[in-house]
Image (tube, rainbow, N blue to C red):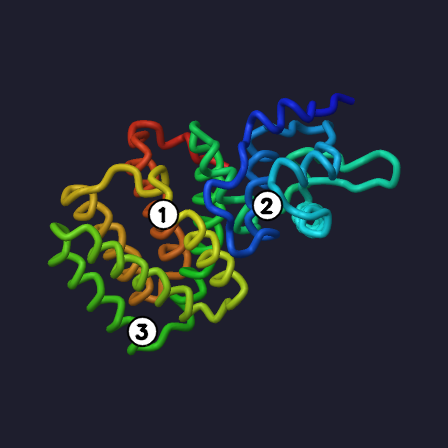
Amino acid sequence: MSVTRPDQDAAATPGWTRRPASLAVAVTAELVQRVVRGTYAEGTTLPPEPVLCETFSVSRTVIREAVKVLQEKGLVRVRQGAGTTVTPMAQWNMLDELVLAAAVAEDESLAILDDVVVTRRLLESDMAQVAARTAGQDTVDRLRALVDRMDELVGDTPSYEEHDRLFHDTIMQASGNRIARGVVRSLERQVLNSAGYHGRSGRDMCTASNKGHRRICERIAARDEAGAAQAMFTHITEAWLVRRGDAGDPGRLKR
């Protein structure tokens, strides 16, 4: 088992440029990034408390609080006499805001975002299927109004994307599945500001995307449960592949 040398750690991060208001939160965020980045690799131990205290210019209490939070997130395992060991990625809580944000930031291949989209696709397809069975006429009218409005907004990407989110959220609410909606909203909120998640955009992409929305709306209005699920599945898949630049590789997201 290898141990990060104190001199390596100190050299990696000088003292705070501006001392944060909440030291424990700031130290936790930095340690999460280091673990995810591989600065502290799987199976290695974190530097001893005195070294971390010196590195961040904080007390032992702050370091212990930060390490406790890392353990709750599944990033480390603390054992008396064995130090604090970085755990395998399979044990990390990938739904945690700090962990997911760090993972997305470090993932040049966009594989983490692929996983986010596949998860969203699975949940939203199911919710669209339920919405086709349970949605009232007021919901169908709202979906049609949103689709019509998005046709007018294809040249205004920020406004289009805002209405896009409203469209999807209307379907999720109509499904009545509060847990699935919560997971999707949480995941999207955490990756929404990622350049990789936004990817390519523009009028043509918004126009193509809204054709997918219209198909979903039509299937829900027709009470076609299987058709609504398939329309949502296809829409989310195609929209993501276009944004990430892999429109010619539809098999990429086959899971």
Q: Amino acid at mark 3?
A: Thr
Mark 2 highlights which residue? 27
Q: Nearer the viewer, residue 246 or 127?
A: 246
Q: Nearer the viewer, residue 255 or 243?
A: 243
Residue at 41% from the left image edge and 30% from the top image edge: 251
Q: Of label 1 and label 2, which has the lower sequence position? A: 2
Question: Tag 1's secondary structure?
Answer: loop
Residue 201, picture quadrant: top left
Q: From the viewer's perspective, is the residue at label 3 or at label 1 nearer?
A: 1
Q: Nearer the viewer, residue 42 or 224?
A: 42
Q: Crowdedness of circle 3 by 10 Å Cα count: few (<14), some, many (20+)?
A: some
Mark 3 highlights which residue? 139
Q: Nearer the viewer, residue 185 or 235?
A: 185
Distance from label 2 to label 3 (Cα)?
46 Å
Image quarter hosting the N terminus? top right
Q: Crowdedness of circle 1 by 10 Å Cα count: few (<14), some, many (20+)?
A: few
Q: Of label 3 and label 1, which has the lower sequence position? A: 3
Specify the farthest residue to the right.
Answer: 81
Distance from label 3 to label 1 (Cα)?
29 Å
- 19 w.r.t. 10: above or below: below
**Residue 193, disc:** 1
Q: From the viewer's perspective, is the residue at label 2 or at label 3 nearer?
A: 2
Q: Crowdedness of circle 2 by 10 Å Cα count: few (<14), some, many (20+)?
A: many
